[in-house]
Image: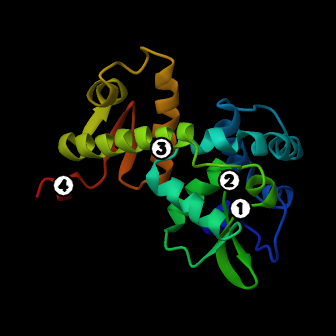
Amino acid sequence: MGELRAIKEVIYGKPTLGEILSVLDISVLNEIVYNVRFKKFKGAGKKEIVDLLIQTLPGAVREIIKKFDIERYELIKRIIENKGILYNCNINDSKKHALTLTGLVYPIVIDCERALFMPDEIFNSLGDIDNIDIVRAIQNNTKFINNIHGILCYHGYMDLDDIFQHTLKRKAAESLENLSYLETLRMAVFYYDWIEVDGMGFRYEEVEDCLI
């Protein structure tokens, strides 16, 4: 899941959102659609999906950010502080790919340098991401993901209900609020290498190191 899988063609200059989306694999586009609409957009062609995302992504970015934890939130803030372009970002290709799947940030080449890039259509739609609703969501998500890290590190493997019982004290299907945490967990699975989906459960990939 590297940079070249996310964007197969090198783009020079500051591309539009549409220009970036048009060079992504349809599998990546469908994943972005899922993060925006929380359901698959089946049977659509690539142009139709790109057009849909151009229309819907800018209006969905704040809700997507509310599924992040502190690491991704602070990264987004750094990109914003740098006017939408962050050079020399020290994160691995897997995390870059996971960020691409959110639809907010893309690894591209600008002026012969690799960078994480936020298209103007996304940048201009963000507004204030330091408001209390977003900050509270980030804090809750961070606690949730840290708790998952701890219990998977200790147990090695847990199914979804066990994770929710340990972290939220309720089963995965017991409240609508859990849907938000499910999306938070789903995005974390893409972003963090230590979470591995295994059948109907989740496995910590380096559990031996935790027990030393």
Q: How many marks?
A: 4
Residue with the mark numbered 3: 138
Residue at the image position 63 percent from the left and 38 percent from the top: 63
Identify which amino acid the numbered label 1 is placed on: Met
* Mark 4 lies on residue: 210
Could you tell whether 154 is left or right of 7 in the image?
left
Residue drawn at the location 53% of the way across and 67% of the way down: 93
- Residue 27 picture location, percent across and down: 69, 47
The residue drawn where x is 42% and y is 14% is 174
Is 179 placed left or right of 87 in the picture?
left
The residue where tag 2 is placed is 104
* Distance in Å between CA atoms under marks 1 and 3: 20 Å
Residue 102 position (above or below residue 110): above
Question: Where residue 203 sits in the image (x, y, percent)?
Answer: 31, 43
Q: Earlier in the sequence, mark 4 or mark 1?
A: 1
Q: Quick check: 173 above or below 145?
A: above
Tag of residue 118: 1
Q: Nearer the viewer, residue 203 or 114?
A: 114
**Label 2 sits on what residue type?**
Leu
